């Protein structure tokens, strides 16, 4: 096949094939989330949900496959170079990596379909950004022709994808935590400032105690595990030789609970989920997510005001979806822990990527560091995530404080990527579009 | 049992008490007190966070505001109000030194504070870590059943032999065991991970000193200079040969290597397909290097492919057209040479020729259009950078060139010059205007080379590797403890195992399970009871990802 034919195939695979598949997968995941049993496991009602998850997974897997096809054919259409030479390709590969992470880590290993829905949302956003930055396949400048292009740019993309997953967790954590705190305050069972609202709404539906967890505030990375109620029964089953001894503090374990209790628990959980949702109003969520979306879209302003407003609108839709699902999200401390683990995974990658960039710069531009705008802002991103990690090791800024810092850090990364490429001229600008 | 809020030992976060001063009268005492207060403040984690935030703000400014060392022209435009937010803002930015953030005193102060803070935090941590490695013992627990992880194993062995077996397993798995002191109840206490996590964190933070030393010494000992050489010409690497040079303070003139560079052939080409917009595809130059001892060799310098000669690295960074121009005034040859022209916009190259011989001086402001098929019709000037139909145009100036002060060879200082006319010529052509004849003899190219010497590059690389080497275990190693008690029963021994972790509950959950299973394997007729009250977030638990 000629390069032109590969290019045509590659373009078609990106749009409409992959884009629409991702979009459909995302919507199906949201639909599935709506039917997934609420915490505490009402097993009888989730058959529709399970079928929807299977459908969504199929769509996502097929989408990821066609996406991989797009990436490979794009490389063939550009004379066999690595398919991450400009902003379009970069954004597209990031979308792909996020989808892979969502499927492999969050769905198949952690079984967190409700989180996968939002990761698909993040991936679709990245694909949208790619579409806005569309560039036809073509060769690269000879200065980019280096092994370091593979190493530096790939690790930067990997770091970006991991941080994109991290900020999704940060945002969901902030929303869920707000709801939990408000429910807790409303129930007057826990003091203000407690971050584990769920722990303080015991006996919502009678009998089904939501375990009285310790306040986790004090410990570095949470010495207490995050609790997922629907995991309890599985845990017991999984250790075949063991028997579950009900701990004294627990209201009752899954083994003990009879069918009636299970129903009551499910009711209690539904009531709790509804209470969570009721505490955050649509207007409030729309305002916050719209504001954040507007800021994010401002980085894309050189591509037109419509793009900026569109970003804000999509952010509002995402925010509203998150609000609708807030009762089904993992609890706040779990989301916090997921965010931390994701960012702690991304930080060494980013560190390595920046260093690889310095090595490449020494080889290519004759100096390892020159405070070029891109270098400066990559360093800024590094500092921002270093602050997040330090903050999370300090008692005072755990939980919400850290989540906000995580959002700011990603804002810096977003700015580094889009705004610096589109607004500021520097040595990296040829790689821009 | 007390809970610690971070992996760092308690000594790492000291609150330094202020010594009671003898009263406000003695200025020395006040200064001392202030210094102690500042030292105490700097040693707090929070202060480090604030300092990092300041660094972030400065860096943000450096990203948005054009920086003098990088884009001097844009800075000048901002200052003049031609670009950017206006002269008032530019003046404010100037006052804060934000046009050169990394050369500003503010940044220097911040750097000093950051490293002081780092030192203040690290010294007690080194000490504590050394103590820990040498002497620390895992503490006993008084409340075995109160821990997050709990399991019980029954075995037919007696207590003594069970303890021996458990001891073996723990030692093999490299747990640090508390020596027995005969206190009752008899308890095995073991710990892992603290030394590694804390040690790695120390290594990570220490690597910043290595990087700092590498950068500072590198600036003192290093050298960097730029020069443009016309194709076919020869250039000698000496202190005075460079267009611009930045020698470090400790870099002496005799440190120059003195080799000769002949630029044999320069290669540059583009994809000439309009759809690809003239993307460059070739950029390299063939050179011959002749060392002072007479040995010579030829090599190619490319975009990502610098050449190292006697510890000096030669990069190809730049290029431009170099027309050979002759200026005749009233029939006498006043100037003959190559004008090194630099790109100035899409498909234009600019430069200057300065002929101080005649009276008054002659200066030419030259523009080269590489592809202008019809000189009279600018619509045929495609903006393409390849020289298919080069056209040289110029403005002629007479007056005082001002060559008594050093100036940029490529820019005409027009303060004392008067414009006299304009002209244009093709290769081999000439143009006469009044008594000035300008001849466009031939067109060559020049290459911009950078010669640099960075003796601390290996040190910097080592610093970077140390940083990564420390970072990963600092994030992933984790501190955890187990306690084991043995109780004799009719059938043998009942062993209770309790565990707690300070970080990474998910990973510890798996490890605890694995440890209990491994213990049971070493004990005959073992029965396991897992009493872990709080399984971490996972379903099923063996599928917890440990990133």
Image: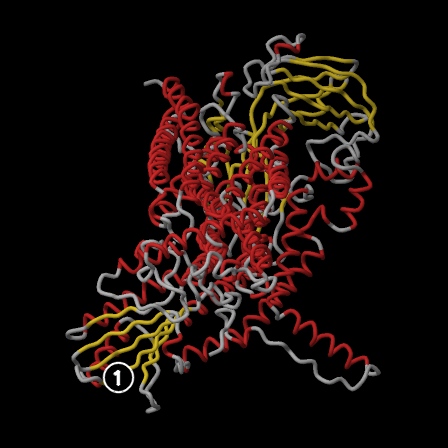
Residue sitting nearer the eye, B267 or A229: A229
Q: Quadrant of the C terminus of chain B?
A: bottom left
| Residue under label 1 | B487
Where is residue B197? Give x, y as percent: 43, 67
Q: Please, what secondary structure does the residue beneath circle 1 have?
A: strand
**What x and y, as percent, mark residue B321?**
59, 25
Residue A45 appears left or right of B405: left
For the image shown, how many numbered marks are present on the structure? 1
The subunit letter for the residue under badge 1 reads B
Q: Position of residue A213 (x, y in %)?
A: 47, 65
Vertical position of residue A303 compared to residue B117: above or below:
above
Q: Nearer the viewer, residue B424 or A367?
A: A367
Question: What's the residue at 61%, 69% (across, down)?
Answer: B44
> Is residue A33 or residue B483 the one in the foreground?
A33
Q: Residues within 10 Å of mark 1 (few under 14, many from 20)?
A: some
Residue B458, given in percent of the width and then of the height, sits at 46, 56
Residue B295 visible: no
Inspect this view and state whether residue B253 appears: yes
């Amino acid at each position: 096949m000629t390069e032109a034919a590969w290019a045509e195939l590659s373009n078609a695979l990106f749009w409409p094939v992959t884009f629409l598949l991702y979009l459909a997968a995302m919507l199906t995941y949201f639909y599935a989330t709506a039917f997934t049993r609420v915490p505490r496991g009402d097993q009888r009602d989730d058959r529709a949900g399970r079928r929807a998850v299977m459908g969504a997974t199929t769509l996502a897997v097929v989408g990821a496959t066609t996406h991989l096809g797009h990436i490979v054919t794009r490389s063939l259409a550009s004379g066999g170079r690595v398919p991450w030479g400009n902003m379009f390709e970069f954004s597209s590969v990031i979308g792909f990596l996020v989808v892979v992470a969502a499927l492999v880590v969050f769905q198949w290993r952690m079984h967190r379909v409700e989180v996968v829905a939002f990761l698909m949302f993040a991936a679709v956003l990245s694909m949208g950004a790619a579409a806005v930055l569309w560039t036809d396949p073509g060769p690269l400048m000879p200065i980019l022709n280096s092994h370091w292009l593979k190493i530096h740019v790939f690790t930067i993309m990997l770091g970006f994808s991991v941080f994109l997953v991290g900020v999704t967790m940060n945002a969901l954590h902030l929303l869920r935590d707000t709801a939990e705190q408000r429910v807790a305050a409303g129930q007057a069972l826990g003091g203000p400032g407690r971050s584990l609202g769920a722990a303080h709404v015991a006996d919502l539906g009678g009998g089904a105690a939501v375990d009285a967890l310790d306040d986790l505030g004090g410990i570095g990375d949470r010495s207490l595990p995050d609790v997922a109620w629907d995991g309890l029964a599985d845990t017991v089953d999984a250790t075949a030789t063991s028997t579950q001894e009900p701990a004294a503090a627990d209201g009752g374990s899954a083994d003990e609970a009879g069918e009636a209790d299970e129903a009551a628990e499910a009711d209690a959980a539904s009531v709790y989920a509804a209470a969570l949702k009721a505490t955050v109003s649509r207007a409030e969520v729309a305002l916050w997510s719209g504001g954040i979306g507007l800021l994010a879209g401002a980085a894309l302003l050189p591509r037109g005001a419509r793009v900026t407003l569109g970003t804000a609108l999509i952010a509002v839709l995402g925010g509203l979806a998150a609000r609708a699902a807030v009762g089904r999200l993992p609890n706040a401390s779990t989301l916090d822990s997921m965010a931390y683990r994701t960012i702690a995974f991304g930080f060494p990658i980013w560190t390595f990527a920046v260093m690889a960039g310095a090595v490449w710069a020494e080889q290519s531009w004759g100096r390892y560091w020159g405070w070029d705008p891109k270098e400066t802002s990559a360093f800024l991103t590094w500092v921002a995530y270093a602050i997040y990690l330090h903050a999370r090791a300090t008692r005072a800024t755990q939980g919400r404080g850290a989540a906000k810092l995580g959002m700011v850090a990603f804002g810096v990364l977003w700015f580094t990527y889009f705004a610096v490429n589109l607004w500021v001229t520097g040595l990296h600008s040829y790689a821009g579009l | 049992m007390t809970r610690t809020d971070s992996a760092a030992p308690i000594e790492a976060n000291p609150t330094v008490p202020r010594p009671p001063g003898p009263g406000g009268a003695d200025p020395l005492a006040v200064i001392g007190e202030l210094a102690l207060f500042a030292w105490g403040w700097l040693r707090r984690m929070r202060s480090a966070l604030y300092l990092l935030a300041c660094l972030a703000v400065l860096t943000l400014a450096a990203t948005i505001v054009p920086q003098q060392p990088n884009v001097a022209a844009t800075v000048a435009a901002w200052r003049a109000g031609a670009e950017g937010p206006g002269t008032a803002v530019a003046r404010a930015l100037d006052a804060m030194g934000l046009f050169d953030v990394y050369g500003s005193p503010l940044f220097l102060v911040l750097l000093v504070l950051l490293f002081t803070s780092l030192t203040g935090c690290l010294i007690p941590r080194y000490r504590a870590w050394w103590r820990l490695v040498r002497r620390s013992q895992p503490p006993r627990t008084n409340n075995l059943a109160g821990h997050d992880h709990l399991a019980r194993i029954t075995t037919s062995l007696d207590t003594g032999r069970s303890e021996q077996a458990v001891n073996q397993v723990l030692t093999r798995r490299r747990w640090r065991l508390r020596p027995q002191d005969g206190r009752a109840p008899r308890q095995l206490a073991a710990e892992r991970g603290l030394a590694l996590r804390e040690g790695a964190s120390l290594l990570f933070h220490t690597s910043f000193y290595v990087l700092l030393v590498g950068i500072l010494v590198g600036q003192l000992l290093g050298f960097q200079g730029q020069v443009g050489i016309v194709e076919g010409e020869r250039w000698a690497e000496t202190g005075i040969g460079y267009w611009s040079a930045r020698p470090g303070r400790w870099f002496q003139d005799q440190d120059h290597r003195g080799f000769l560079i002949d630029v044999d052939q320069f290669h540059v080409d583009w994809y000439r397909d309009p759809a690809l917009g003239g993307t460059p595809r070739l950029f390299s130059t063939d050179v011959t290097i002749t060392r002072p001892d007479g040995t010579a060799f030829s090599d190619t310098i490319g975009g990502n492919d610098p050449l190292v000669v006697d510890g000096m690295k030669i990069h190809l960074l730049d290029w431009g057209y170099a027309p050979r121009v002759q200026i005749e005034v009233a029939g006498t040859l006043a100037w003959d040479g190559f004008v090194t022209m630099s790109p100035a916009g899409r498909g234009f190259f600019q430069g200057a020729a300065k002929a101080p011989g005649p009276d008054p001086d002659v200066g030419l402001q030259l523009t080269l259009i590489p592809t202008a098929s019809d000189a009279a019709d600018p619509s045929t000037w495609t903006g393409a950078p390849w020289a298919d139909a080069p056209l040289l145009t110029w403005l002629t100036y007479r007056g005082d060139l001002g060559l008594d002060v050093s100036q940029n060879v490529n820019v005409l200082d027009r303060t004392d010059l008067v414009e006299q006319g304009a002209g244009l010529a093709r290769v081999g052509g000439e143009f006469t205007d009044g008594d000035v004849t300008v001849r466009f003899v031939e067109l060559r190219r020049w290459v911009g080379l950078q010669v640099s010497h960075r003796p601390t590059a290996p040190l910097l690389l080592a610093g970077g590797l140390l940083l990564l080497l420390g970072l990963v275990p600092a994030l992933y190693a984790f501190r955890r403890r187990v306690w084991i008690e043995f109780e004799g029963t009719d059938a043998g021994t009942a062993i209770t195992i309790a565990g707690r972790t300070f970080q990474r509950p998910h990973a510890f959950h798996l490890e605890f399970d694995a440890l209990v299973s491994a213990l049971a394997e070493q004990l005959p007729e073992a029965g396991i009871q897992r009493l872990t009250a709080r399984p971490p977030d996972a379903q099923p638990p063996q599928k917890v990802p440990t990133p």
